[in-house]
């Protein structure tokens, strides 16, 4: 392990040239730059984080993942689950000083669906009545988007869809100043708590607080997001005092334990997994798929290779999205794996390939999985390729096995069930899994408005998917943040677009 030594060397270099600390500016880092400031194209987590700072939505998620009012000071859903009524605040201004109105909201939604925009996020709004006709040019307006008066907008869906209200908190559905939408890629035109001061591509993003924000404005005057591609550089800059917050790189937690920096651990809404092609031999046999799960010692991998920065997956859903987790489906049991393999007709003669996107920092983990499978008679060759080739291969159903992860778009179990295991999605985009009973339950989950019944069905679907074992369920990763001693009030959230850096203060140590 030479990385800690390299970090220390870099730290000493940076300490020699660190500037005086600017207590008016909060400084963080991204490993890569954002795609731009147009919400319509916010498809990655980093861009979505920035969009959530400079724009507002009708509703948003707080740090505890609760849905709370934003531009809509209140809302209601009728008994059919199809009609949403929003009462809009009348004191919201865009960064240029112009008043935000219900017309901006309607036009922002229309812009997402407009084929001339070519947004990849139309799926967020295409359930609005008339959306499909609008998208093909058959209609010039959305029938299901109704402006009742200057402070009320109504949205009608073609059928009940429970996650829709959460869709409205997504970055792509942020409300823009429609008068300034020509330069959105480079310059935002939002109403959020932060305003863009400067964006230097692959260099840094400088934001200043919106002093006229309709809600309490950020406590820090400015925010600087540096683009630092090397994790060692980020670590060294943090030690030198040039970064206020550090997302600890994978595998480095042991090194940082020697310091007394403030530490915050966040259980992320994600899952890491091995997808198995369930549509053909050999992985169309559930006994083999279960054996793949029983054969691996996940606890050992998490403890030794992941610095305990993950929790065991008991099915596809993170525990935060389940009211009850239940007993562990696949504890480490190589003898059970061998028994299942014999029952399925595989006795030390199974040879297959695992597709991996090239440059994976988790390659040592994959080798550990490979070793565990070999012990029960499953020989797995690791096939690496670049991300585009890998993604195309998965979508076309080429791999028998592939290693991937999934991060939540919104904090709802449905977001882990429909996109990944409903046959309409899995059979065309992922690991070709199909179960009609699971499809029916997922569709009920999408329509139900009764929260208790819905959560029970989500737990049922999680158990059924785990039992069917279309994946090797690995773990849900945690993220550890460190803050310097002059930072207080930082409270990261499990959902990526909830943290708006509003209540952070940066004060000289006493």
Image (tube, rainbow, N blue to C red):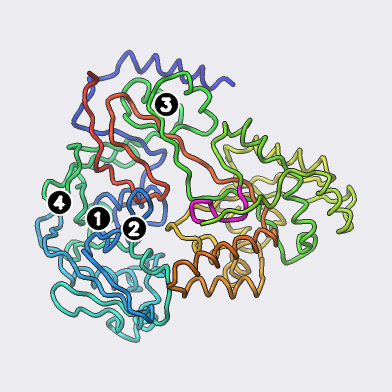
Question: Reading the chain from its start, which is encountered first: label 2 or label 3?
Answer: 2
Q: Position of residue 63 (x, y in %)?
A: 35, 48
Cα–Cα gap, marks 4 and 3: 33 Å
Mark 4 nearby-residue class (10 Å; few <14, some 14–19, many ≥20): some
Q: Is residue 413 left or right of residue 246?
A: right
Mark 2 nearby-residue class (10 Å; few <14, some 14–19, many ≥20): many
* Residue 171 - label: 2
Q: Is residue 396 above or below residue 498?
A: below
Q: Nearer the viewer, mark 4 or mark 3?
A: 4
Cα–Cα gap, marks 1 and 4: 11 Å
Q: Give me the residue at 79% from left, 56% from top.
A: 288
Cα–Cα gap, marks 1 and 3: 30 Å
Q: Give me the residue at 12% from left, 65% from top.
A: 90
Residue bounds of the magenta highlight: 313-322
Residue with the mark numbered 1:
55
Between residue 227 and residue 124, name the one nearer to us: 124
Cα–Cα gap, marks 4 and 2: 18 Å
Question: Reading the chain from its start, which is encountered first: label 4 or label 3?
Answer: 4
Q: Examine the image and state in which quarter residue 462 appears.
A: bottom right
Q: Give me the residue at 41% from left, 65% from top.
A: 120
Quadrant assignment for the C terminus: top left
SS type, badge 1:
loop
Q: Nearer the viewer, mark 1 or mark 4?
A: 4
């Amino acid at each position: 392990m030479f990385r800690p030594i390299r970090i220390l060397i870099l730290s000493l270099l940076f300490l020699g040239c660190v500037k005086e600390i600017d207590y008016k500016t909060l400084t963080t880092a991204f490993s890569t730059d954002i795609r731009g400031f147009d919400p319509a194209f916010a498809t990655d987590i980093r861009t979505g984080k920035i969009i959530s700072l400079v724009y507002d939505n009708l509703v948003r998620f707080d740090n505890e993942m609760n849905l709370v009012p934003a531009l809509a000071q209140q809302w209601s859903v009728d008994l059919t689950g199809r009609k949403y009524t929003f009462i809009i605040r009348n004191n919201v201004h865009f960064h240029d000083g112009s008043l935000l109105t219900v017309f901006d909201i309607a036009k922002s939604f229309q812009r997402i669906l407009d084929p001339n925009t070519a947004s990849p996020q139309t799926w967020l709004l295409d359930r609005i009545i008339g959306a499909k006709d609008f998208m093909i040019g058959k209609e010039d307006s959305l029938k299901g988007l109704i402006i009742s008066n200057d402070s009320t907008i109504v949205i009608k869906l073609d059928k009940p869809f429970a996650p829709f209200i959460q869709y409205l908190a997504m970055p792509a559905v942020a409300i823009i100043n429609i008068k300034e939408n020509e330069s959105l890629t480079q310059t935002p035109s939002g109403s959020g708590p932060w305003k863009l001061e400067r964006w230097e591509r692959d260099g840094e993003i400088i934001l200043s607080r919106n002093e006229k924000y309709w809600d309490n404005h950020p406590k820090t005057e400015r925010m600087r997001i540096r683009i630092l591609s090397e994790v060692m550089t980020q670590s060294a800059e943090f030690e030198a005092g040039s970064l206020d917050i550090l997302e600890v790189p994978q595998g480095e937690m042991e090194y940082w334990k020697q310091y007394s920096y403030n530490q915050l651990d966040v259980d992320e809404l994600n899952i890491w997994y091995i997808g198995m092609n369930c549509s053909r031999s050999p992985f169309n046999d559930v006994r083999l798929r279960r054996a793949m799960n029983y054969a691996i010692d996940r606890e050992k991998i998490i403890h030794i290779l992941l610095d305990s920065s993950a929790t065991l997956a008991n099915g596809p859903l993170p525990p935060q999205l389940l009211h009850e987790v239940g007993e562990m489906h696949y504890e480490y049991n190589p003898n059970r794996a061998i028994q299942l393999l014999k029952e399925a007709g595989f006795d030390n003669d199974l040879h297959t390939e695992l597709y991996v996107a090239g440059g994976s920092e988790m390659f040592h983990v994959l080798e550990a999985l490979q070793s565990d499978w070999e012990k029960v008679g499953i020989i797995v060759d690791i096939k690496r390729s670049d991300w585009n080739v890998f993604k195309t291969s998965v979508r076309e159903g080429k791999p028998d096995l592939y290693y991937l992860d999934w991060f939540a778009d919104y904090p709802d179990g449905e977001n882990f069930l429909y996109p990944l295991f409903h046959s309409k999605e899995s059979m065309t985009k992922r690991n070709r899994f199909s179960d009609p009973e699971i499809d029916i339950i997922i569709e009920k989950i999408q329509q139900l408005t009764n929260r208790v019944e819905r959560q029970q069905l989500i737990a049922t679907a999680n158990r059924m998917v785990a039992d069917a074992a279309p994946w090797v369920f690995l773990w849900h990763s945690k993220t550890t943040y460190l803050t310097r001693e002059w930072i207080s009030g930082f409270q990261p959230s499990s959902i990526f677009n909830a943290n708006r850096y509003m209540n952070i203060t940066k004060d000289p140590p006493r």
